[in-house]
Amino acid sequence: MTAEWLKNAVFYEIYPQSFCDSNADGIGDIPGIISKLDYIRELGCDSIWMNPCFDSPFVDAGYDVRDYYKAAERYGTNEDLKRLFAAAHEKGMHVILDLVAGHTSSECEWFRKSCLPEKNEYTDRYIWTDTVWVAPQNIGNIRGWLRGGYDRDGSAAVNFFTAQPALNYGFAVKDEGCPWEQDMHDPGPMSTRAELKKIMKFWLDMGCDGFRVDMAGSLVKNDPDGKGTIALWQDFRRWLDEEYPEAVLVSEWGEADKALTAGFHMDFVLHFGPSHYPELFRTAHPYFSAKAEGDIRPFFDVYLNNLKKTEGMDGVISIPSGNHDMDRMARTLTPSEMKIAFAFLMSMPGVPFVYYGDELGMREVEGLSSVEGGYYRTGARSPMQWDCTSNAGFSAASPDCLYIPQDREMMHVINAEAEMADPASLYHTVKELIALRKVHPALQSTAGFRLIEDTYPLVYERSCEEETILVVINVSDEEKQTAQDTSGSLLWSFDHKALTGNTLPPQSAFIIRKG
Ligand code: NOJ
């Protein structure tokens, strides 16, 4: 991999609103994050993905950026971000920011100017039809139109929620009946491209280590095979390789062959689309349940196909424990099941991502009203549970002032302090597994993968020049047999269970070095 540090990286995702509040206003902030770097480092994670932290009206939790060059006041200042990068680097850690490349907030100055009837620098920064009476349906990567309310006679394309107008990177395939559709290389799209580079440069110069790119695969419109968007990102990657060769890009794309061809260093397995990822931890019958009623084969069909298609490419597929857009895994899995799930996550190829609080088994907070465009996602975004003090150590504000309510029922049991003190906790399992991954090259991002058994049990091999490791997982609450020779040196087993021959005890997982 070009960016050497990714070979052995383990990421921790921080939702800045909910991580640590240093000034008692009920919402997390950058100084709070700086104060918790040692916690993340001690867990074993050496890299951080931080959700958007830029100036925003927060209609979509910050995925509606008003000013890309300014930290949101509620989180701190640009100087605080600079301090975060420097403090992380001092501890041998990396920090990547969330780059919302496909749309801005409708409150962004660029959009306001783009809405003016007089031609100006921002007229073509967004996608506009040539009259407000036109708002065509079914154009690939366009989700709707903003119409009326502006003096400019046109409809503006929407990228996600209606407060998020789509930036103009042009159309891959233009419809002759729509003369307002612009070519990717027209001046408008090229200036959007230049601005995005400027934004990346601004933060990279400040010390950030790269970006997670929001909706990365949908920037160019009417792009049926993704070729336009791929070409666009190849341009960004060429530029990065020249100017910032250590910087990394991870995509929310979900089609690894396209994303890696486009130049991303990592592409996420997503919880939507064709991945079958939810079937691992989150459906009514997830694979990682002791009831053993799940089926992991559809997941592997897609995963293996992607692995094959990306063989030899300079990039990897990342499987997250969760993220700010999906239910907490604790909603469907018990603590033991989560421990076994982490044995899987930490022994698979690619760069693993731990969603804050998943290492503790933080639960979904049920029954919440939507906060800042969270809707069903709000319950997975509740404040981090640090200790047994008020607000579980997240904030010194009054509990009813918290930005999102906490898991009041369990926060005195499920929290970092309590779990760090208990060697049998999920926290310790995750920590052990990360530590194991760090010292075994065969468990790391780019080492080989071979699936051997894919029902109950799940058996696979990881290998590299130095070693071969067998991972044997029986999440079911019944004894199972494996056809594999399980001899070798046992590096780790769930609950310190012993392994004899081919019989796998109920709820067990083993990581064995073969040679
Ligand atoms: C994906 C982000 O993860 C999600 O939180 C956001 O709402 C949409 N993209 C729109 O930016």
Image: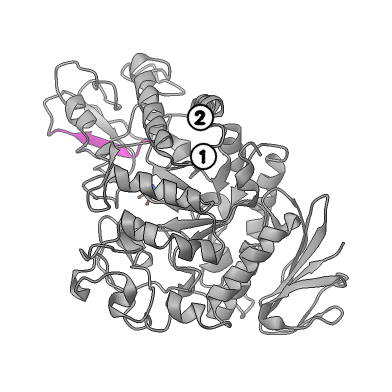
Q: Amino acid at mark 2?
A: Trp
**Which quarter of the rendered picture does the C terminus lie within?**
bottom right
Residue under numbered circle 1:
249
x 28%, y 63%: residue: 22
Is there a contact, CB below 8 Å, between mark 1 and mark 2?
yes
x 66%, y 82%: residue: 495
Residue under numbered circle 2:
233
Q: Is residue 7 left or right of residue 43?
A: right
Above or below: residue 437 compared with residue 408: above
Q: Residue 392: in sight, yes or no?
A: yes
Q: Which residues are magenta?
A: 142-148
**Which quarter of the rendered picture does the N terminus lie within?**
top right
Q: Is residue 5 magenta?
A: no
Q: Nearer the viewer, residue 49 or 156?
A: 49
Q: Nearer the viewer, residue 217 or 323?
A: 323
Q: Amino acid at mark 1?
A: Leu
Above or below: residue 176 compared with residue 193: above
Q: Nearer the viewer, residue 150 or 215?
A: 215
Whole-percent x, y for residue 408 in the image: 31, 80
Q: Is residue 170 left or right of residue 293?
A: left
Above or below: residue 23 compared with residue 183: below
Q: Is residue 238 left or right of residue 404?
A: right
